[in-house]
Amino acid sequence: MVTAMMLTMSMTSVAFTAQEPLSEVPRTRLERLSTGANICRWFRWAADRPEEHFAEYISDEEMRVMRAIGLRHVRLCIHPEMIYNPERPTEPIAPMMAHIDRAIERFHRADLAVVLDLHNENQERLENDPVWREGFVQFWGALAKHYSTVNPEMLILEIINEPVFTGREGEWHALQERIVEVIRKHAPRHTIVVTGAGWGGIDGLERLPPLKDRNLVYSFHFYEPFPFTHQGATWSSPEVRVIRDIPYPSSPEAVAHLLSAIPDEGARAMVAFYGQQRWDRARMSARLNEAIEWGRRHRVPLYCGEFGVFPLVAPPESRAAWFTDFGSLLRESGVGWAIWGWDEGFGFGRRVVDGRVEFDTHVARSLGLREAP
Ligand code: BGC
């Protein structure tokens, strides 16, 4: 009896030790990350923007609306070249930094935390240009120093958007580890968002060995099922570019009538397979659970930093159904998120009409946000 009790006690204590969280990210920050939206077009595509764009792209009133519908943070996407010059890696480019600092300050005043996301879209230079890559490590040191005095409850640093590194994932893992160390040296209290390779998706996350640092949030992006969320996306794979009217949920019957109209063989096979896979809420839940299980196993917090459906040729009722399903799954999961995006048709598709902010209210509803401020 005593032996059995002692055994139970010692097992409990072993179990307890094993369950100790490996994360020290304050709960308050995870709460801030619970609901958010990407700001996609403020600090991307620099060349063709007039100066006023950088100062005024989002007004104080619009920020107020974002907060009032229930958003708690923004993921501010920044093309690295706007502030990073590989020839002077430790000197972030001052005029644009001033605009970014001002944008961050204004979001903070509107009670929106900011995830500062270096939104690299040129995989080539990150993967194959050693000068760019080494400079980028140093650059992060300078950036971390610059932001070290900003309240860490309100500013979270994301190393890079969607690294790919096909067949060389170990290189990404090592590089990411180095950048975390450099940031940590200069910004000891700030939470950092890290991610796996493979476009920052769930498969890459599952192959990522958790890092030593405990003040990290692990990101994944969710654009599944891809033929549905990216139908008609001109910048994506040749197969998805040419397909349209793809329904969700999927079944062989639901896609049968589309197949004969798809001339490209690869695209046709992809859509047929999408039908066979019978994507629905249950399948989406199983996929999301892979990420959640990984997070549980490693006892680290997760962040779904992008998700959405390209609206151009997707049937509107299918797009709405996808958001209903994924929105409810996200809410049940408790994983923090940022939709792609506030100012992108994939997500809220916000428009400012006569000074009034309009956005997709079904998307807001499905994410548990208010439809009006
Ligand atoms: C890319 C965008 C793209 C979106 C959905 C983002 O990470 O940077 O260009 O529209 O993913 O594919």
Image: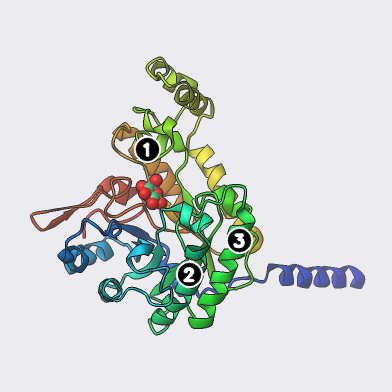
Q: Residue at x 52, y 38 (%)?
A: 282
Point out the tag, 2 or 1, that comes first from the N-terminus: 2
What residue type is disc 1 on? Ala
Give percent across and percent down for residue 260. Answer: 41, 14
Q: Residues within 10 Å of mark 1 (few under 14, many from 20)?
A: many
What residue type is disc 3 on? His
Q: Residue at x 56, y 65 (%)?
A: 176
106 up-or-down from 348: above or below: below
SS type, badge 1: helix
Name the foreground residue: 218 vs 184. 184
- Answer yes or no: is residue 179 visible: yes
SS type, badge 2: helix
**Are the residues at dot 2 and dot 1 in contact (C-beta closer than 8 Å)?**
no
Give percent across and percent down for residue 198. Answer: 54, 49
Residue on which the image places disc 1 = 321
Residue farthest top in this picture:
260
Q: CA distance from mark 3 to mark 1?
A: 36 Å
322 up-or-down from 247: above or below: below
**Quadrant in which residue 142 is drawn:** bottom left
SS type, badge 3: helix
Using the image, tell me which numbered label, if any, was put on residue 135: 2
Q: Residue at x 49, y 74 (%)?
A: 138
Q: Residue at x 35, y 38 (%)?
A: 233
Q: CA distance from mark 2 to mark 1?
A: 44 Å
What residue type is disc 2 on? Gly
